Amino acid sequence: MRARTFLIGGIAVAGALLLIEPAFAQAVPAAAPPAPVDNGGALTRAMGQISGDGRPLSLSLQILVLMSLLTVLPSLILMMTSFTRIIIVLSLLRQALGLQQTPPNQVLVGLSLFLSLFVMRPAIDQINAQAFDPYGKGQIPIEEAVGRSGRVLHGFMVKQTRESDLKLFQNLAEAPAFRSSADIPFTILLPAFVTSELKTAFQIGFMIFLPFLIIDLVVASTLMALGMMMLSPTIISMPFKLLLFVLVDGWALTMGSLAGSFAT
């Protein structure tokens, strides 16, 4: 009963306020402009913390930034490191050997990931020294740490990108000439870097395919000369390709060639 009384009273008060508000609005002179409401004050202050004015980010904002970085981490690994070139070359090697699912995809991805960590070790050490350690000690804010990490990756990508690819996307974007490599924005550098990586990966894959292609041609010609038309040349040539790959220590040559292709 008491709750019902409170509910009825609340409805009555709300109705009274709705009736009083128009009358009060008429009492105010029309010439008096309404006081401006600072709706963006809190947002401006929050953006001031992110913009690097010297004040540290709050813990909630730091967690938000870190979670945002984790969402784009797979794309960063794929497109801003050596992972793209390595996984493509290993996939082409598996096709050149005539193997469908050996090694399996999980093994190729894991091998590419750890080889990418080996290739990117100088950049990782530089990021650790310039960004991660100072941020862990509280010397720099998180936005400065992210900026320093981006500059390290920017330098790595510039060294691995062909000048022709950079000019291509620079002309497509109608951007002016850059005074130095540090002035190249990520919007132009990233597609140029990926294009260069794809081109390099296919060039390496072509060189890997050649000896195995010769084995396939020899086996197919031999079977045709012997009149064994019903026997698949792929099945016969696969043991010879595996034997050649093992004798020349193919995995070591492939890994060494891939790691050496990133030397500048």
Image (tube, rainbow, N blue to C red):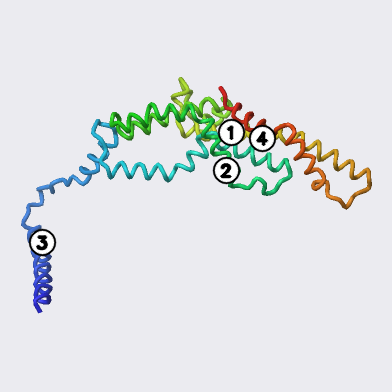
User: Label 1: few (<14), some or many (≥20) within 10 Å?
Assistant: many
Secondary structure of residue under mark 4: helix
Left or right side of 34 for 160: right
Q: Which residue carries the number 3 mark?
A: 21
The image shows residue 218 at horizontal and vertical percentages of 85, 38
What residue lies at 27% left-to-right and 42% top-to-bottom? 59
Residue 98 vs 55, above or below: the answer is below
Sequence-first tag of 1 and 2: 2
Q: Look at mark 4 in the image and give the residue it sits on.
A: 251
| SS type, badge 1 | helix
Amino acid marked by disc 4: Trp
* Element assignment for label 3: helix
What kind of residue is marked 2? Val
Query: Which comes sooner in the sequence, label 4 or label 2?
Result: 2
Q: Are marks 4 and 2 in contact (CB under 8 Å)?
A: no
Of badges 4 and 3, nearer the viewer stands: 4
Q: Earlier in the sequence, mark 3 or mark 2?
A: 3
Q: Nearer the viewer, residue 226 or 151?
A: 226
Q: Quadrant of residue 261?
A: top right
Q: Kindly give the residue lying farthest to the right in the view shown.
A: 226
The numbered disc on residue 197 is 1
Indicate which label's residue lies in the foreground, 4 or 1. Answer: 4
Quadrant showing the N terminus:
bottom left
Are dots 4 and 1 in contact, CB under 8 Å?
Answer: no
Q: Nearer the viewer, mark 4 or mark 2?
A: 4
Q: Residue 109, labelled with which disc? A: 2
Q: Earlier in the sequence, mark 4 or mark 1?
A: 1
